[in-house]
Image (cartoon, rainbow, N blue to C red):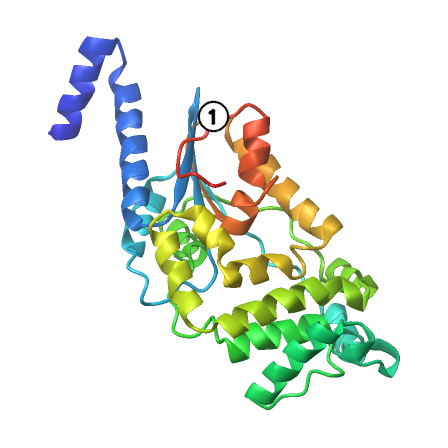
């Protein structure tokens, strides 16, 4: 009754057809539901509909007070959703990884960390080795960084489903079309990683050491800042900095292609009818010259939290 009444009022006051008023009401309900979920969201209004951009962080702590059920509700009313795509690995890629595993996990030519790091950097790494009783001397800087973040800082323990998982399940249940960026081939990813010089991962190691040294409090702080829509604070969190500094995001070619794919997909969605709900990594959205900056440069008017 309430929805019908609103449609009639809109028709009388604004010369809007009942069908148009109904569509506007649905779009508004989706926006409200996403906002109430607690995930930071930006909206782009277009002549034919609305694009909603949900900024996702990996590994949301269970202590973060957000309401994923609201995101499920919004998904069931969307016209389509855009979600990240998993890389496409073939059996041949797995074999290549097995036979070339050492080139990804170890420094080349029996070199050691001190051959690449400054005295100060090596001393910090030694302190962490002593604290956790591990040896990173021969390990690749990327693998050492992942070990620090995932096993020593343990940032992905005691977490809830990511926004992508929630939206994907809801979309499949409601038979909502799912669009994704083009999938990267496993071969291309492995070749890119194999071609990277060891020194190219030192920045990743430094940020991983900083996050690990800061300890568990930064994990909860990141989740709470995300829930409060304080995007600059999330982006300045040592954990978020580390995740966005490591491969593949920090690779100029690969990271740039990932960002361009998201920008193209969202721009294309702006010309479609109805509501498009896109779940995008917050780091890709809110970084300098990221997707939000690129969309704004294209002339899109974006409503939502400050991101810089």
Outermost residue on the right side: it is: 109
Quadrant in the picture for residue 52: top left
Q: Residues within 10 Å of mark 1 (few under 14, many from 20)?
A: few
Most foreground residue, 180 or 306: 306
Residue ID at (57%, 68%): 210
Quadrant in the picture for residue 94: bottom right
Most foreground residue, 176 or 111: 111
Residue ID at (60%, 77%): 147
Mark 1, residue position? 301
The answer to whether residue 43 is visible is yes
Q: Secondary structure at mark 1?
A: loop
The answer to whether residue 161 is visible is no
x and y, in percent, of residue 134 in the image: 62, 88
Left or right side of 201 for 225: left
Left or right side of 143 for 101: right
x and y, in percent, of residue 92 in the image: 76, 70
Most foreground residue, 53 or 25: 53
């Amino acid at each position: 009754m309430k929805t019908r009444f609103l449609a009639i009022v809109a028709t009388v006051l604004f010369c809007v057809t009942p069908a148009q008023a109904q569509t506007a009401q649905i779009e508004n309900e989706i926006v409200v539901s996403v906002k109430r979920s607690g995930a930071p969201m930006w909206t782009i209004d277009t002549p034919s509909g609305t694009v909603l951009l949900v900024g996702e962080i990996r590994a949301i702590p269970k202590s973060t007070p957000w309401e994923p059920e609201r995101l499920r509700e919004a998904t069931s009313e969307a016209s389509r959703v855009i979600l990240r795509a998993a890389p496409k690995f073939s059996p041949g890629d797995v074999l290549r990884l097995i036979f070339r595993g050492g080139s990804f996990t170890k420094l080349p030519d029996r070199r050691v960390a001190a051959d690449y790091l400054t005295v100060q950097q090596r001393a910090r790494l030694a302190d962490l080795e002593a604290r956790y009783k591990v040896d990173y001397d021969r390990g690749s800087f990327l693998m050492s960084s992942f070990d620090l973040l995932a096993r020593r800082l343990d940032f992905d323990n005691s977490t809830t489903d990511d926004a992508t998982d929630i939206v994907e399940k809801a979309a499949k249940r409601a038979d909502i079309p799912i669009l994704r960026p083009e999938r990267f081939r496993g071969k291309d990813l492995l070749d890119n990683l194999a071609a990277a010089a060891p020194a190219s991962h030192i920045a990743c190691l430094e940020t991983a050491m900083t996050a690990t040294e800061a300890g568990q409090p930064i994990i909860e702080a990141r989740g709470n800042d995300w829930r409060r829509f304080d995007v600059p604070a999330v982006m300045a969190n040592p954990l978020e900095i580390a995740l966005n500094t490591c491969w593949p995001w920090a690779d100029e070619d690969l990271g740039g292609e990932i960002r361009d794919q998201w920008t193209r997909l969202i721009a294309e969605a702006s010309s479609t009818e109805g509501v498009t709900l896109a779940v995008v990594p917050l780091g890709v959205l809110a970084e300098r010259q990221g997707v939000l900056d690129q969309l704004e440069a294209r002339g899109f008017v974006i409503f939502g939290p400050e991101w810089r």
